[in-house]
């Protein structure tokens, strides 16, 4: 299903279902004493379906719950996004429910499978980390868990999800989303009573684990690089991630700007190669940038590296310039320097964790124009927030970093 189809289902089916099931939820919670009792986090299910990057941002929160309560963790995610959970392996694959969202009928079928799976695994608490999705609120209720923790709008207008979340936490749109995720876990641990997350979140709690990269994966990646660039003699690797997901195409920096950036880098440094990464379906889009750069040291690597090989590739590389998308977060589990181009989103909420990401952001008065309040939908076509980022601005930032890493060709 397309992103817009999912939005329509969530709006036209999700909101009425939340309304109709709210009395049932209230009565069930009353009879079970769900409001009074502290959450039993022994078998806790996290719900995050659609954002691969958010699965990594949530990792510190999941590890905190596991460390502080010895909880067994479970996760439900769209099947196509599951690979993001394999990067850090915080949750065993047997504890992950992969939901098929290829079409409406497969989704409905998997809802019933999900209900059976949660009961088989005796899910006691659900933590819904999606931002105001009615569908995930419904999944929380269908799970049968006594405690259902998620975000609430509290006194804000809109974002209706009924009474399906029985231990709500006010979503704060002014702090990083990772802080919000930790607050959900703090609620599950009984650290505060009402919907206001009054417990401070320290920087140490937002520490992202680094990935374990085996030597075999590294060798495989090096061999693939040599295959697409036979002259490679260990030159430093600069990655350009030029595409972004269809969920928010407004995040894409123009192809011609990436081409100008690539040309400048190759003119300035003779000890680098450029790899333009992407999924197999993005090969044609990436090829247009490759053609624009038009240099033998620039390779279209879309579809060359499997998802499992991306992290080893990042560990081998010197830096990456990317649109605000999943790869920026995948790279955060390594020490790779990443320059992230932000447009309709804001780095204040979504800068990758790990300490190695640097945002490039104009911060226009209209930015950010997408948020939880509009389910990340914008009608802006001209996109000055991202198209207004000039190649010269990016080149200056990248050069400042590279001049300490690579000898400049005079």
Image: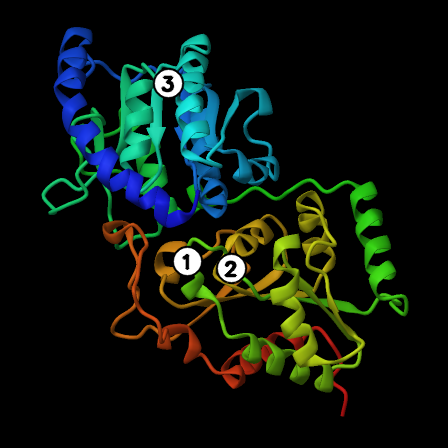
Side (left or right) of 64 relative to 34: right
Return the mark for residue 244: 2
Q: Say which of marks 3 and 2 sits in front.
A: 2
Q: Nearer the viewer, residue 38 or 284?
A: 284
**Residue at far bottom of view:** 410
Task: State the CA–CA distance, disc 3 to disc 2.
Answer: 36 Å
Q: Please report the residue visible at 60 percent of the width from the left and 32 percent of the height from the top.
A: 89
The correct choice, above or below, for 409 with respect to 16 in the image is: below
Labels 3 and 2: the sequence-earlier one = 3
Cβ atoms at labels 1 and 2 below 8 Å apart:
yes
Circle 3 residue: 41
Quarter of the rendering containing residue 316: bottom right
Labels 1 and 3: the sequence-earlier one = 3
- Does residue 189 appear in this view? no
* Secondary structure of residue under mark 3: loop
Quarter of the rendering containing residue 159: top left
Return the mark for residue 3: none
Q: Quadrant of the N terminus?
A: top left
Task: State the CA–CA distance, disc 1 to disc 2.
Answer: 7 Å
At label 2, counting other C-alpha atoms closer than 10 Å, the crowd grade (few under 14, some 14-19, many 20 or more) is many
Q: Please report the residue visible at 76 percent of the width from the left and 74 percent of the height from the top.
A: 272
Task: State the CA–CA distance, disc 1 to disc 3.
Answer: 34 Å
Task: Give the image location of residue 171, x and y in percent.
Answer: 24, 43
* Secondary structure of residue under mark 2: loop
The correct choice, above or below, for 257 with respect to 25 in the image is: below
Side (left or right) of 219 relative to 360: right
Question: How many labels sit on residues?
Answer: 3
Task: Give the image location of residue 122, x and y in percent.
Answer: 41, 10
Quarter of the rendering containing residue 202: top left
Circle 1 residue: 248
């Amino acid at each position: 299903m397309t992103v817009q189809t999912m939005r329509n289902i969530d709006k036209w089916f999700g909101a009425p279902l939340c309304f109709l099931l709210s009395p049932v939820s209230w009565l069930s919670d009353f009879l079970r004493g769900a409001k009074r009792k502290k959450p039993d986090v022994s078998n806790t299910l996290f719900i995050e379906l659609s954002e691969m990057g958010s699965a990594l941002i949530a990792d510190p929160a999941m590890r905190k719950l596991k460390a502080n309560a010895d909880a067994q963790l479970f996760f439900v995610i769209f099947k196509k996004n599951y690979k993001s959970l394999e990067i850090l392996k915080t949750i065993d694959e047997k504890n992950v429910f992969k939901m098929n969202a290829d079409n409406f009928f497969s989704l409905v079928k998997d809802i019933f499978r999900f209900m059976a799976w949660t009961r088989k695994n005796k899910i006691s608490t659900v933590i819904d980390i999606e931002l105001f999705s009615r569908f995930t609120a419904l999944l929380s209720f269908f799970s049968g868990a006594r405690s259902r923790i998620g975000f609430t709008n509290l006194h804000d207008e809109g974002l209706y999800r009924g009474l399906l979340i029985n231990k709500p936490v006010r979503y704060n749109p002014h702090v990083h989303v990772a802080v919000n995720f930790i607050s959900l876990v703090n609620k599950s641990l009984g650290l505060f009573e009402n919907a206001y997350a009054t417990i401070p979140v320290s920087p140490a709690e937002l520490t992202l684990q680094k990935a374990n990269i085996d030597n075999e994966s590294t060798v495989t990646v090096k061999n693939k690089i040599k295959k697409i660039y036979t002259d490679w003699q260990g030159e430093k690797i600069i990655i350009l991630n030029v595409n972004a997901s269809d969920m928010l195409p407004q995040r894409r920096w123009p192809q011609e700007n990436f081409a100008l950036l690539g040309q400048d880098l190759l003119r300035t440094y003779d000890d680098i190669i450029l790899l333009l990464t992407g999924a197999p379906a993005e090969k044609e889009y990436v090829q247009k940038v490759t053609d624009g750069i038009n240099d033998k040291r620039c390779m279209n690597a879309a579809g060359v590296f499997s998802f499992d090989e991306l992290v080893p590739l990042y560990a081998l590389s010197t830096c990456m310039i990317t649109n605000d998308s999943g790869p920026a977060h995948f790279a955060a589990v390594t020490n790779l320097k990443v320059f992230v181009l932000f447009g309709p989103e804001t780095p204040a909420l979504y800068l990758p964790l790990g300490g190695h990401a640097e945002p490039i952001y104009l911060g226009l008065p209209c930015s950010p124009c997408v948020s939880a309040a509009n389910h990340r939908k914008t009608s802006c076509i001209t996109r000055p927030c991202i198209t207004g980022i000039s190649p010269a601005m990016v080149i200056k930032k990248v050069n400042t970093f590279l001049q300490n890493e690579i000898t400049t060709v005079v």
